[in-house]
Image (tube, coloured by chain):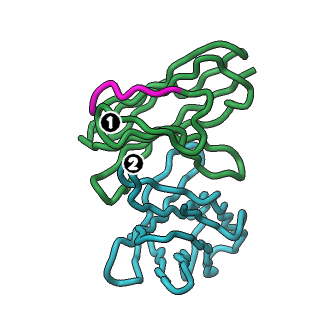
Chain colours: A cyan, B green
Amino acid sequence: AQSVTQLDSQVPVFEEAPVELRCNYSSSVSVYLFWYVQYPNQGLQLLLKYLSGSTLVESINGFEAEFNKSQTSFHLRKPSVHISDTAEYFCAVSERGTGGFKTIFGAGTRLFVKA
Amino acid sequence: NAGVTQTPKFQVLKTGQSMTLQCAQDMNHNSMYWYRQDPGMGLRLIYYSASEGTTDKGEVPNGYNVSRLNKREFSLRLESAAPSQTSVYFCASGVGLLNEQFFGPGTRLTVL
């Protein structure tokens, strides 16, 4: 059985400061890893994903995440955040089950960017 | 291309009433999902459908039923609503084997 742990429920940070949102997972098989972002009153949107290959993946708006197999982590980072990055961020893990691929989401980390 | 659409956006029910949440996608995805989102608990999978004609229980299926009407539509039914089902419900559809998901805007349900 797989699980996803997001270690911080809320992360307050000042604008232009760096941020790291932590995600650890447990799984006995090969996994695919995702970060989704949810802006207020909206559905989730894919931010970035790791499927295979390079362990460092990037999004178009400056976020990056690194897959670390030995530590079973997929932390999300941004070197300089903007007010508009205020949102809730969900780490997710997919693995193949009997009915196809299933995805498990973490509980979410709420990022507050302050001026 | 509307993506994933959900109706209604908001709904208030009394305990014991029934209702169906509708979901449709126009991206030709095989997989569709229903989640509920509660504060501090993230998204929890209620039911999913890996392909047309199949449905499977997720993490929290009790009190719900689903119908995969065709490839586009996947509905969620509450037969006898309870206050514990007050939540925001999201429908999603999945891309192929990699299970990247696309989400609808959500339905905010309150059961009094």
Query: How far across and down, in percent of the image, does residue B7 sit?
Result: 47, 25
- Secondary structure beneath dot 1 equals strand
Q: Chain ID for label 1?
A: B
> Relative to the observer, which residue lies in front, A72 or A61?
A72
| Residue at the disc numbered 2 | B102
Q: Where is residue A69 in the image (x, y as percent from the top left)?
A: 48, 83
Q: In which quarter of the image is the N terminus of chain A?
A: bottom right
Does residue A84 appear in this view? no
Where does residue B69 sit, x and y in percent of width and height? 33, 24
Q: Which is more toward the observer, B22 or B31?
A: B31
Q: What label does residue B90 carry, if any?
A: none
* Kind of residue sitting beneath label 1: Gln
Farthest residue to the bottom: give it: A70
For the record, the magenta segment spans: B65-71
Q: How crowded is mark 2: few (under 14 residues within 10 Å), some or many (20 or more)?
A: many
Residue drawn at (38%, 70%) of the image? A60
Asked if B17 appears above or below B65 in the picture, the reply is: above
Answer yes or no: do the residues labelled 1 and 2 have beta carbons within 8 Å? yes
* Disc 2, SS: strand
Q: In this rendering, is residue A46 above or below B21?
A: below
The residue pinned by badge 1 equals: B25
